[in-house]
């Protein structure tokens, strides 16, 4: 089952000739979720070959324009494409008010419903849950109310060891019971513990999206164990004073957050337009956290399956 993140935008407030504002698509078991929607998001989705009709929900971190201006034309385009299923949108207040005004003046006859869900940015709260995943909010420290998002895959069903099936001559009913996590009683009266018969096929995977924020130990701790973490790194370490004043992070801040979270890999983005080559920022972050990668637009980061007893995935 797939678990991947595609980068659509990596710039901070000022877009450049080669970078777009923040946007990503998270693909979990072929369920697609848009995370932030800077200007040009729908064009970037087209370039990445992502069908916008596949979107299950949208998550907006905060209401600065470089994270939300691309949402409204996308809503219109989805109507032109003939979307019929409701589109949940999770965002801090007052997006509900803005969305209502947009729908009144520009998209009053969309063929689908938009469902706004307020994200309380001071709370770590379960926002969305289905058979395959949970999405939680993570409070962040920016100039306005801002939330990060934690995408956590649910524990997969147990597998029954085929050698144990043959060894004990398990029936279909006994195999089903083992898959449910139950012990199995044989015809001889012997009871076989479930852990002897089954194994977890792979460990649940987690992606943490920490958008615009100053360094936050609390946010890093809420993302503990993330296989993949995105953390803004607007500035180089030498600009730490500017970063603090503007509620942003440096490369060192992002690396410290990844270390504190015990993340497997770190993606940094939201680069200031002053940096023409993001590699200098990546190299700086790698001094503290070697598994740091740039948020190159169009690139996809895949979190591979691994057995529960295996080490953190290091494959990009």
Image: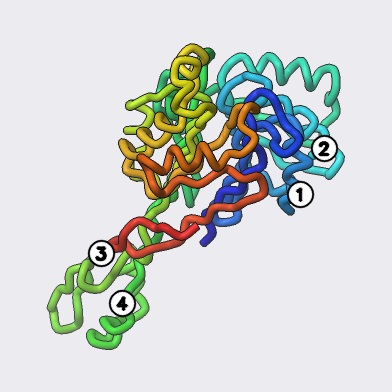
**Disc 3 versus disc 4: distance between alpha carbons?**
14 Å
Precedes in sequence: disc 3 or disc 4: 4
Badge 2 vs badge 4, beta-carbon distance below 8 Å: no
Q: Secondary structure at mark 2?
A: helix
**Disc 3 versus disc 2: distance between alpha carbons?**
49 Å
Question: In percent of the image, x 44 and y 50: which residue is there?
Answer: 153
Choose mark 4 or mark 1, whichever is in front.
Answer: 1
Choose mark 2 or mark 1, whichever is in front.
Answer: 1
Which residue is more in the foreground, 56 or 309? 309
- Residue 118 lies, in percent from the top left, at 55, 22
Which residue is more in the foreground, 170 or 96? 96
**Disc 2 versus disc 4: distance between alpha carbons?**
48 Å
**Disc 3 versus disc 1: distance between alpha carbons?**
48 Å
> Would residue 21 be seen by someone viewing this image from the given angle?
yes
**Disc 4 versus disc 1: distance between alpha carbons?**
43 Å
Precedes in sequence: disc 4 or disc 1: 1
Residue 197, above or below 133: below
Precedes in sequence: disc 3 or disc 2: 2
- Residue 249 lies, in percent from the top left, at 47, 25
Q: Which residue is mark 1?
A: 47
Which residue is more in the foreground, 265 or 191? 265
Precedes in sequence: disc 2 or disc 1: 1
Left or right: residue 185 compared with residue 75: left
Question: In percent of the image, x 44 and y 27: which residue is there?
Answer: 237
């Amino acid at each position: 089952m797939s678990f991947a993140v595609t980068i659509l935008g990596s710039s901070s407030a000022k877009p450049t000739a080669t970078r777009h504002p923040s946007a990503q698509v998270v693909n979990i078991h072929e369920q697609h979720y848009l995370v932030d929607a800077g200007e040009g998001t729908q064009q970037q989705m087209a370039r990445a070959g992502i069908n916008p009709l596949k979107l299950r929900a949208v998550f907006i971190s905060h209401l600065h324009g470089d994270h939300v201006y691309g949402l409204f034309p996308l809503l219109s385009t989805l109507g032109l494409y003939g979307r019929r299923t409701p589109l949940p949108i999770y965002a801090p207040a007052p997006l509900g008010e803005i969305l209502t005004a947009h729908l009144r003046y520009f998209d009053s006859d969309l063929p689908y419903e938009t469902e706004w869900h307020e994200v309380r940015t001071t709370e770590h709260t379960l926002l969305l849950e289905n058979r395959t995943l949970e999405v939680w909010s993570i409070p962040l420290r920016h100039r306005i109310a801002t939330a990060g998002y934690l995408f956590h895959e649910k524990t997969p069903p147990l597998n029954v060891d085929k050698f144990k099936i043959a060894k004990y001559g398990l029936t279909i009913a006994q195999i089903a019971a083992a898959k449910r996590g139950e012990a199995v009683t044989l015809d001889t009266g012997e009871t076989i513990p479930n852990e002897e018969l089954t194994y977890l096929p792979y460990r649940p995977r987690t992606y943490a999206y920490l958008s615009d924020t100053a360094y936050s130990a609390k946010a890093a701790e809420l993302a503990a164990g993330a296989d993949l973490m995105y953390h803004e790194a607007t500035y180089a370490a030498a600009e730490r004073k500017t970063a603090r004043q503007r509620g942003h992070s440096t490369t060192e801040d992002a690396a410290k957050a990844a270390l504190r979270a015990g993340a497997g890999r770190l993606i940094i983005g939201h680069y200031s337009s002053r940096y023409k080559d993001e590699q200098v920022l990546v190299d700086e972050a790698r001094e503290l956290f070697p598994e740091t990668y740039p948020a190159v637009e169009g690139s996809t980061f895949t979190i591979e399956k691994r057995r529960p007893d295996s080490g953190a995935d290091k494959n990009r």
